[in-house]
């Protein structure tokens, strides 16, 4: 009997399919105590945003948030739209890079005065 070997099957997809994304939130989020404490240097004139990471497209992930599928309560309740001008130039990337970029983007936006939630 011939010994079988496992072959690596290519799905045709690149491993760089993860993305970071930014969602514009309603300005009422900036008035929540928990959010203000997490963003002490926030500029009230700049928008409130949610930063996330996904293996889907940002548009698919935003639709899932709105539908309540593995959703952030902030995005489900207060999400208005995606802000591709803040993230489109960064995507796509491998999982590890996306996980780090989510944190880095969160810190960068906070430093710039945005009120940021998410961005584990």
Image (cartoon, rainbow, N blue to C red):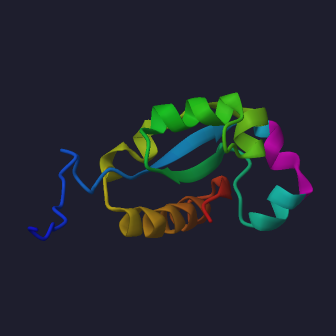
Part of the protein shown in magenta = 28-33
- Residue 29 drawn in magenta: yes
Residue closest to the eye, 91 or 70: 70
- Residue 73 drawn in magenta: no
Tell me where residue 6 sits by quadrant.
bottom left
Quadrant housing the C terminus: bottom right
Q: How many marks?
A: 0
Coordinates of residue 62 in the picture (x, y in percent): 57, 34
17 sits to left or right of 20: left
Residue displayed at 50% across by 62% down: 102
Coordinates of residue 61 in the picture (x, y in percent): 53, 38
Camera sees residue 4: yes
Quadrant housing the N terminus: bottom left
Residue displayed at 58% across by 29% down: 63
Residue closest to the eye, 38 or 72: 72
Coordinates of residue 91 in the picture (x, y in percent): 33, 50
> What type of secondary structure mainly makes up the magenta span?
helix
Residue displayed at 81% across by 57% down: 35
Q: Is residue 84 above or below residue 120?
A: above
55 sits to left or right of 120: left
Query: Residue reaching furthest left?
Result: 2
Residue displayed at 64% across by 46% down: 49
Camera sees residue 81: no
């Amino acid at each position: 009997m011939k010994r079988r070997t496992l072959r690596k099957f290519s799905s045709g997809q690149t491993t760089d399919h993860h993305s970071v994304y930014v969602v514009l939130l309603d300005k009422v989020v900036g008035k929540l105590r928990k959010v203000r404490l997490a963003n002490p240097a926030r500029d009230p004139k700049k928008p409130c945003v949610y930063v996330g990471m996904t293996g889907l497209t940002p548009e698919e992930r935003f639709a899932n948030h709105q539908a309540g599928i593995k959703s952030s309560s902030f995005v489900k309740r207060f999400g208005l739209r995606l802000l591709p001008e803040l993230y489109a130039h960064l995507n796509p990337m491998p999982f590890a890079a996306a996980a780090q970029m989510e944190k880095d983007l969160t810190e960068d936006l906070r430093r710039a005065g945005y009120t940021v939630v998410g961005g584990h």
